[in-house]
Each structure stands twice: as structure tokens, then as C-alpha cells.
Image (spheres, helix red, strand yellow):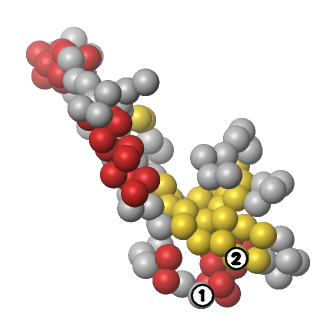
Amino acid sequence: MRRLSDPLARSLRTSIAHMAYREFKDQWGTEWKAWETVPTSVERRGTTTPPSGTPVAKAERRKRENSAEVRLRMRPGWEGGWLSFESAMEKRRLVPLPGDWDKATDEQLNAWLAESKSFPKRGSFIE
């Protein structure tokens, strides 16, 4: 169990406390849950990474190794977050995260659902 002073635990509590969440039905009557997923710590390595073995690369690696942050490597375009959709049978994601999505109509949520990509359903954070 993480202590209250742990930066990751604080970050997760803050994210969960402010997470927007919606429920809606699609045109076939399937119930869907929607929420935003915005990574707080992202590994921004790509073509701009200094060549391996250079002093800059070594310094960056030491900085990451000594950091208490959890850092994730993201696909380009995903750094700003995505809209997650979940039904009893399927999980989908829409990139990029639409602005003010939590105020959208059910019709707009259905349009975004149709544009989203299916992902393997491995479990749910929202039950």
C-alpha cells in the first residue's frame, strides 16, 4: 500500500477525483461508459533522443533512473490523452481526446464511438 506522501499515489488520487465520466446508450441499446484518460508522466523519447553513449543521453538516463515518477512510453499523438469507451463486451479508444467531451450530447458520443478503435478488454477500472 502506498503512503499518502507518495507522489504517484497523490497524482492518482487527484486524477481520479477530477475524472469526467459519462454513461450513454448506442443505437442498438448497448450501454457504454466513457471517461478520459490523460497520462500525467510520459516518456517523450523518439527521433529526438540523443545518440546512445553521449554525455547528454547518459545524463538523461540517470535522471530517469533516479526519478520516483512512473513514466510511460506513448505512441505519437497519444500524449494528450484519449477518450475511453467500455461496454460489457468491448473496450474502445478515441485519439485525440475531444475538448469538452463530457458536455457532448449522446449523439456526439455515439459519433465518436463509431470513430474509435477497438482494444482488447483486459479488465476495468470502472465497475
- Does 24 appear above or below 56? below
Q: Which mark is residue 105?
A: 1
In the image, taking residue 98 as reference, residue 26 lies left or right, namely right
Q: Secondary structure at mark 2?
A: strand
Total number of numbered labels? 2
Residue 24 % position (x, y): 70, 76
In the image, taking residue 106 as reference, residue 1 lies left or right, namely left
Give the image quarter of residue 58. Answer: top left
Nearer the observer, 50 or 96: 96
Residue furthest to the top in view is 53
What residue do we see at 47% from left, 73% from top?
A: 98
In the image, taking residue 94 as reference, residue 48 lies left or right, namely left
What residue do we see at 33% from left, 51% from top?
A: 14
Residue under label 2, please give it: 24
Residue 92 % position (x, y): 68, 57
Q: Is residue 79 visible?
A: no
